[in-house]
Image: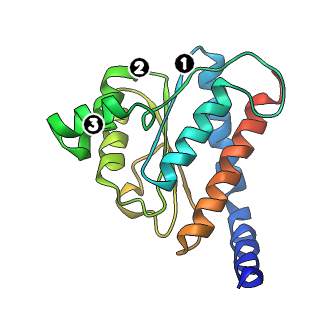
Amino acid sequence: MTSAALDELIATAERTKALVPQIEAAGVALKAALDSGSKILTAGNGGSAADALHLSEELVGRFSKERPSLPAISLCADPTALTCIANDYGYERVFSRQVEGLGRPGDVLVVFTTSGNSPNLVLALKIARQRGLITIAVLGKNGGAAKGLADHELIIPSQNTARIQELHTFILHAWLTQIEADL
């Protein structure tokens, strides 16, 4: 079973090689935003929330080398904001409401979703675009309802949630390497 899962991961990674130019272009957008003094906002649900947290904490902390802290906020991190917004506006607005309050033109919103069908992330992408944020959607399966809503779209070519999440981690690590390269 483990060998079959590893074989499937390797096959998915091979298919994902076609996305390298798009992954790098999204990394350039992240780096450019940070270089201009803008911030990165991240969001996701469940395991994808962990990816959103992971990207933000590595930017604020560090990834592989000592460097200045970089401005990033995970919209999944504050349980008081999440529960307040969900209670007052509904769960569909837990991220878009935070984008409204925290996002500024030139900032970047990065969403992680294996299905692309999370209504709260779809709405966050729409609001971010309306407010002048750069948007990046890290998706899986066929991209779902989020497909076509982001400036940069990365759809992992797999139907398996575990393989999609594993490649999402690879992508966020690739971006961090790209961002830290000349710091």
Figure check: 79 above or below 48: above
Which mark, by number, is residue 71?
none
Quick one: label 2, few (<14), some, or many (20+) residues within 10 Å?
some
Q: Earlier in the sequence, mark 3 or mark 2?
A: 3
Which amino acid, mark 1? Ser
Image quarter where the C terminus lies is: top right
Residue in the image at 40% along x and 23% along y:
103
- Measure the C-alpha gap from mark 3 to mark 1: 27 Å
Whether the residues at callouts 3 and 2 have beta carbons within 8 Å, the answer is: no
Q: Which residue is mark 3?
A: 83
Which amino acid, mark 3? Thr
Residue in the image at 41% along x and 54% along y:
148
Question: Is 181 left, or right, of 56 in this rendering?
Answer: right
Residue 168 coordinates in the image, percent (x, y): 62, 55
Q: Which residue is mark 2?
A: 104
Question: How many numbered marks appear?
Answer: 3
Residue in the image at 83% along x and 30% along y:
181
Residue 89 coordinates in the image, percent (x, y): 16, 37
